[in-house]
Image (spheres, rainbow, N blue to C red):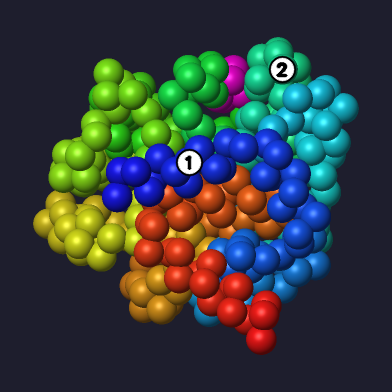
Amino acid sequence: MGITRSFFIALSNNRLLNSGAKKWGFQLGAAKVVAGTDIPNMMASVQELNDNGISATIDRLGEFVTSRKEAQQAATEIIETLQTISTAGTDAHLSVKLTQIGLDIDQQFCFENIHRIVKEADEHNIFVNLDMENYDRLQPTLDILHALRKEFDGVGTVIQAYLYRSEKDLEALKDVRLRLVKGAYQEHEEVAMQSIEDIDANFLKLIKLRLDQPAFTSIATHDHHIIDAAIAYADEQGIPSDRFEFQMLYGFRTDLLKKLSADYQVTSYVPFGEDWYGYFMRRLAERPQNLQLVIKGAVSKSS
């Protein structure tokens, strides 16, 4: 399992394959977990979710951004996305990866781009979540978040349970809307837990600590054991259901999400865009059983 995870993470970081994926088109089963390559297809997918009582957080995919021109264009496209959300009255907010808008180029340049996005989102009353990437980018992301929070309330980020520092980060961000996840990147044992058992235990610990804090929390998992434990804790502590939601990736366990929507707020993480390759490889790394998607995609293409 570890080798398979490492294999797919390595593939997700391959720039040549990412470039080739744009030429191949929407193949290899990606259409099952990515809501199209353009805004109209994405919006149709989100509308279907909304019709089933499911909100959405929309991620306009983009990776390997190395030029200021690319980063500025990405920021403009993200703003176009949020304007479309607002005009349509869609029940959705945004998730943004800072590397897409210049974090690896220059931190101040990246801040200028995300400030432009958050300012526009604030005018439309749309929340923006700063997606958390690998460990090297964690502190720069938090630094940008703190700078934005001096001016805007409608911006938050992600806490990854496999990192040893996450409990301290959780406390420091107790007044900020957060998404809690297990963690999707391959990190060194010096900074991150390695065993599934340890990660799951810490994830549940952080969920309980977070539910005791005042700000809104997105519990992002497909693990029904974790979900059941979170519900039990919320019930025991008398935590109102409007203080948290359950969040799942687009294309995964939609039936469970619909079931939960009867009693709880639920959201689907909806990625879209031509840069789908890296995202798709990380989903395979998290859950190698998703190779079935690849097989089914290849069979349907050949039939």
**Which quarter shows the C terminus?**
bottom right
Q: How crowded is mark 1: few (under 14 residues within 10 Å), some or many (20 or more)?
A: many
In this view of the protein, which residue sits in the foreground, 86 or 165? Answer: 165
Relative to 55, residue 73 above or below: above
Residue to which mark 1 is pinned? 9
Residue 103 in sight here: yes
Residue visible at 66% across and 71% down in the picture: 45
| Mark 2 to mark 1 CA distance (whole Å) | 22 Å
- The picture places residue 42, in percent across and down from the top left corner, at 71, 65
Q: Is residue 281 left or right of residue 160?
A: right
Q: In the image, what residue type sits under mark 2?
A: Ile
In this view of the protein, which residue sits in the foreground, 3 or 93? Answer: 3
In the rendered image, which quarter is residue 50 located in? bottom right
Pair 2/1: label in front: 1
Q: In the image, what residue type sits under mark 1?
A: Ile
Extreme front residue here? 302
Residue 113 in sight here: no
In the rendered image, which quarter is residue 270 located in? bottom right
Residue visible at 59% across and 73% down in the picture: 297
Task: State if disc 1 and disc 2 touch (CB < 8 Å).
Answer: no
- The picture places residue 69, in percent across and down from the top left corner, at 87, 27
Q: How crowded is mark 2: few (under 14 residues within 10 Å), some or many (20 or more)?
A: some
Residue to which mark 2 is pinned? 105
Q: Give the range drawn in magenta.
A: 144-149
Q: In this view, does 230 lie to the left or right of 266?
A: left
- The picture places residue 71, in percent across and down from the top left corner, at 79, 30
In the rendered image, which quarter is residue 205 located in? top left
Q: How many labels does the image show?
A: 2
In this view of the protein, which residue sits in the foreground, 260 or 61? Answer: 61
Prevailing secondary structure class for the magenta stretch in the rendered image:
helix
